[in-house]
Amino acid sequence: MLVYVTVGTCMERRKCGFGHETGVVILIGIAVGAILDVAGDKMSTEFNPVVLFDFGLPFILYTSGYNMRRRRFFDDINNITMFGVLSTVVCFILLSLATILAFEWGWIYKFEEKQSDGTWTHSQVTMPPIEITLLCAMLCSSDIIAAVSLVKYKEYPKIFSILLGEGLWNDAVAVVLA
């Protein structure tokens, strides 16, 4: 995270005309993955969602909100709120209800291949409604990085501010729903 922030700051100060900060994160991820692959069983890694949701995500949302252009945000607050809050809540409700009904009606199966003869078997999967709603809250959050990286602020300031504001509202609502 510190490397990402440092490289992003350097790229912004030097007016880097190529690439994006996310490219640096991808390269760091490839390097860390290669190191872990070479290390093999000597190093153990495990994803800890508590670290991401309690320490990583709030800082990312805070810096995005702090660095955005506030005047544009408040000029377009109606569109941003409609797209960010309303669409996320509606998507969450519809997705949660559909998924809960799919589990209750027995439409979700787990398929396994028998090792001895190669035939397939299936069994019904169950999941508690609270876990379904947590999963749906996470799935309702859209990724704004791809959209914002394609739109240049100087060329399309209104679209950029709506996309950024909608994404921030969307992420915040998804965190509250989870």
Image (tube, rainbow, N blue to C red):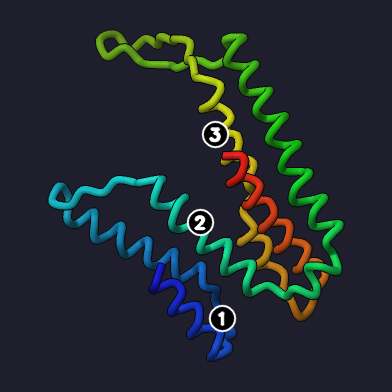
> What crowding class fits label 3: few (fewer than 14 Cα within 10 Å), some (14-19), or many (20 or more)?
some
In this view, the mark in front (3 or 1): 3
Mark sitting on residue 57: 2
Residue situated furthest bottom in the rendering: 14
Sequence-earlier tag: 3 or 1: 1
Count of numbered tags: 3
Residue at numbered disc 3 = 135
Q: What's the amino acid at mark 3? A: Leu
* On screen, residue 85 above or below 145: above
Residue holding disc 1: 18
Q: Are marks 2 and 3 in contact (CB under 8 Å)?
A: no
- In the structure shown, which secondary structural element does the residue marked by tag 1 occupy? loop
Within-10-Å neighbours for mark 2: few <14, some 14–19, many 20+: some
Separation of residues labelled 1 and 2 (CA atoms): 27 Å
**Residue 92 numbered tag:** none
Amino acid type of the residue tagged 1 in the rendering: Phe
Q: CA distance from mark 3 to mark 1?
A: 36 Å
Residue at the spot x=85%, y=57% of the render? 79
